[in-house]
Image (cartoon, rainbow, N blue to C red):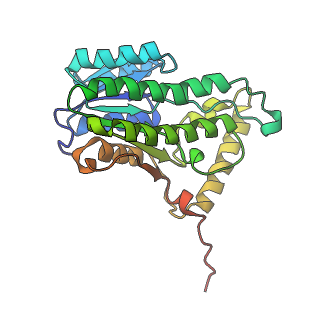
Amino acid sequence: MGNELDGKVAIVTGGASGIGRGAVERFVAEGARVVVADVDDDLGEGLAAALGPGVAFRRADVSDPEQVGALVHAAVQEFGGLHVMVNNAGVSGTMHPGLLDDDLADFHRVMAVNVLGVMAGTRDAARHMAAHGGGSIINVTSIGGIQAGGGVMTYRASKAAVIQFTKSAAIELAHHDIRVNAIAPGNIPTPLVAASATNVDPEKLERYEAKMRETMRADRPLKREGTPDDIAEAALYFAGDRSRYVTGTVLPVDGGTVAGKAIRRRRE
C-alpha cells in the first residue's frame, strides 16, 4: 500500500458492501479521504467507524438527484473538496424465467438507480471539479452492458446506457480536465444476484447461483475467481495520476469473458 491518492477526496456510492466497499478500503489504504454513500445505514456507519476519521458515511439514494447533489455538497463540506467520484450503486432487478414472463414492474427503479444515479453523480461531481481543477469520475457498468444475453433485460439495458453515457460525458467534460471512465466487472461474487431473487426458496437460489457460476467459470479464459479487490485495483488506476491521459474508456475486469469463451484443450 502507498500514497497514490494522498490528499484526494473521493465519494463511492453503494460503498458499504461488495465492489463499493472494496474500492473504499483500497482508496483509504492509498491515502484518500472517502465519503461512503449507501442506503444501508448499519453497514455504512460500521465501515466508516472501522476505517477511521478519514471516512464519513452519508445516506443517499442515488435515484433521487437532490440526494446526489446533497452528497457532493456534504463531501466538500466534510473534507474540503472532491477529486474522485465513483458511481457504483446499482440494483439488478427481479429475475424472471424469460422476457415473455417479465412484467417490467421494476423498470423505473432499475433505470433510476443504475442510469439516473450515474448521470446525476457525474453531473454534480463535475460541477465541483470543473471549478476546481478537474478530477476523475468512474462509472461502474457491467459486462452485461457489453455482451448480449438472456435474463435481467432491464439490468442489461441500464448497464449499456451507462457505457454510452460515460463516453459522451468524457467528450464533453474533457475541456474541464475531468476524466470519465467506466469499469465493467464480470463474474464477481456480490450480494446482487441474491437481492434480485424474490420469493425464491433459499436452497433453490443457492443451487442456481452455484450452477450459474460453474457455467461462468467454464467459459472464462482465466480460471481464478474475480474479487471486489480486482475491481478496486482498476478503480485506483482510474482515480490516480497513472491514468491522467485516459478518458472515455470501458475496462472489462472479467477474467477475459468478453474477449471470448475459453478454449477447451484436448488431453494429450
Q: Position of residue 168 (x, y in %)?
A: 45, 39
Looking at the image, residue 53 sits to the left or right of residue 221; the answer is: left
Q: Position of residue 43 (x, y in %)?
A: 43, 22
Looking at the image, residue 187 sits to the left or right of residue 67; the answer is: right
Residue positioned 62% across, 50% down in the render: 213
Residue positioned 25% across, 34% down in the render: 134
Quadrant containing the C terminus is bottom right
| Residue 125 sits in quarter | top left
Q: Position of residue 249 (x, y in %)?
A: 41, 49
Looking at the image, residue 160 sits to the left or right of residue 38; the answer is: right
| Residue 207 sits in quarter | top right
Position of 240 relative to 216 (above/below) = above
Asked if residue 97 shows in the view, the reply is no
Asked if residue 24 shows in the view, the reply is yes
Position of 261 relative to 80 (above/below) = below
Q: Position of residue 153 (x, y in %)?
A: 69, 38
Q: Residue furthest bottom?
A: 268
Residue positioned 27% across, 34% down in the render: 176
